[in-house]
Image (cartoon, rainbow, N blue to C red):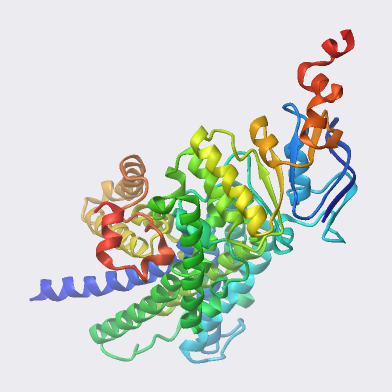
Amino acid sequence: MELVLGLANYALFMGVFIGIYAILALGLNIQWGYSGLFNAGIAGFFAVGAYTSAILTSPYAEGRIGGFELPTVVGWVGAMVAAALIAWPIGKVCLRFRSDYLAIASIGIAEIIRLVIKSEDVLTNGAKGINNIPRPFGDLPYVQSQIAYLAIVLLVLAIVYFAVERQYNAPWGRMMRAVRDNEVAATAMGKDITFRRQQAFIFGAALMGLGGALFAHFNRSITPEAIDPMVATFLVWIMLILGGSGNNRGAILGTAVVWTIWSVSEIATDRLPHEYAVQAKYVRVFLIGLMLQLVLRYRPEGLLPEPLGGTRSASRPVAEARSQKGL
Amino acid sequence: MLELDQLVKQFGGFRAVDKCSFSVREGTITGLVGPNGAGKTTLFNLIAGAFPPTAGTIRFMGEDVTGLPSNELFHRGLVRTFQIPHEFHRLTVLENLMLVPPAQPGESLLANWLSWGKVRDAERVVEARARETLKFLELTHVADVRAGNLSGGQKKLLELGRTMMTDAKLVLLDEPAAGVNRTLLRKLEEKIQILNKERGYTFILIEHDMEMIEKLCDPVVCMAEGKVLIAGDFQTVRSDPRVLEAYLGETQGDAA
């Protein structure tokens, strides 16, 4: 009985994280999958969202701004707005670069954001981070509270999924994929690619901010530790690539697969004798890297490839769509 | 409708286009010929706004459009195709066409969330027009194929098809016949003539296939080494000694 309960708790915990990461992966899919923007600074937008919501909703604490104690929903919307506002000047400067340069620039910017958070005590309480972040239904007993939060995360994920899937199936998504495929031709066809890229960048960043906020409220605290690029940027990239960039369902599937491996392997390594446990942590990173290599080698388009003719899939009968995909 | 005045494009120390001046009358199909490296495609890029000229002015429909980017020129009715096909390779052929019409309601994020019905209605109109275009180009059977998987000739047709998805006034065709087989070529000529007569498109056509130039173009402009050598009807241009010289090499011309 105890084991069952433990497993159930663990599943709830994992479900919440998969939900949060899926939102990050969907945000990245807008930027990379739809628009071809190589954002390697997901952690930065994640952090801005997490801290913004934390500051807006947490109770007063000595030596740091805050004490607004606004409702959580306001914090989450605020997180999206803040991440979008931060993305605007970054996009203005960086989107002129070709994708590989954008990657380098965005890594740098995410690091700057992390260092600012670490050192600006007045804003973020520095290395100690912000605690006492309220959690919706956080007063319920442990299991009920976890279930409630999972339900909220899944609801938010569902809304995000339908919002981005709608754009994929709309002329906006078609236009972004065209800009991704050939920017010269897209310009010649009258599309303002600078503006459109900026739109996609900000849209994706807002979702990353939302993911950060959901994370902070789930943990009830946020510290600079949580914005480690390995976990907050590269893991998300692997989820999207493995799941299938350009495919929103693929992004969610990839998140579930990668997070499960990542999380279960942590349990496994924790059970090892102490002298091996530290080394085994690196094996987890290696395992994820290996998986990425295998996917890129044998299934470069991901588990669920980009759907064909996205803008018409909504109006087409399923059977016809299947036969054209060669399934 | 298009006037080029003393147009210059300099790449470092190399003058790709050197003081080019000519004008294009509405309703014509103007041929642009000349040996390789004469500056024809660079001139196209200047007209289409791919990059600004080093000096000189471009007037389109009576307005100075020098230095305007190609997306803005597109909205004024100037559409181009590319010598090397620039298809959107992961989009389907149908999507490649549906993408083109300007100012679609579904290009707005908010409209897609808030007024989906309106977007869908507009999509149906655009799809019908795209299917009509595919039928005209006889590409209906590949409508749902990724454009990257088309043959070279089909990609050329798709390039032409994109110009038909908007109400273009002036269409720049960069070697539409290159890599296209004979049968398809005749078809292409036919399509261009129909578009010219029935839709009133004005064309500028870069082409090495002289048969096609002879059949379609009046006037013909011949360029060499960045300069306009001569402009006139096909026979005049073909029999001009400077044109022969440009194609056959200077030494021969000097010896003669």
Residue A320, given in percent of the width and then of the height, sits at 28, 62
Give left or right: position of B41 versus B152.
right
Residue B80's spot in the image, x, y percent? 67, 50
B144 or A56: nearer the viewer: B144
Q: Residue at x 33, y 82 (%)?
A: A149
Residue A5 falls in image quadrant: bottom left
* Furthest residue in direction top, as rendered: B255
Asked if residue A63 shows in the view, the reply is yes
* Pick the front one: B179 or B56: B179
Residue A242, horizontal then vertical, whole percent? 35, 53
Would you say residue A31 is visible in this rendering? no
Q: Quadrant of the C terminus of chain A?
A: bottom left
* Residue at image point 80% right, 16% down: B249
Q: Is residue B245 left or right of residue A179?
A: right
Name the foreground residue: A327 vs B133.
B133
Quarter location, residue B109 = bottom right
Q: How many marks?
A: 0
Q: Position of residue A2 (x, y in %)?
A: 11, 75
Q: Nearer the viewer, residue A73 or A285?
A: A73
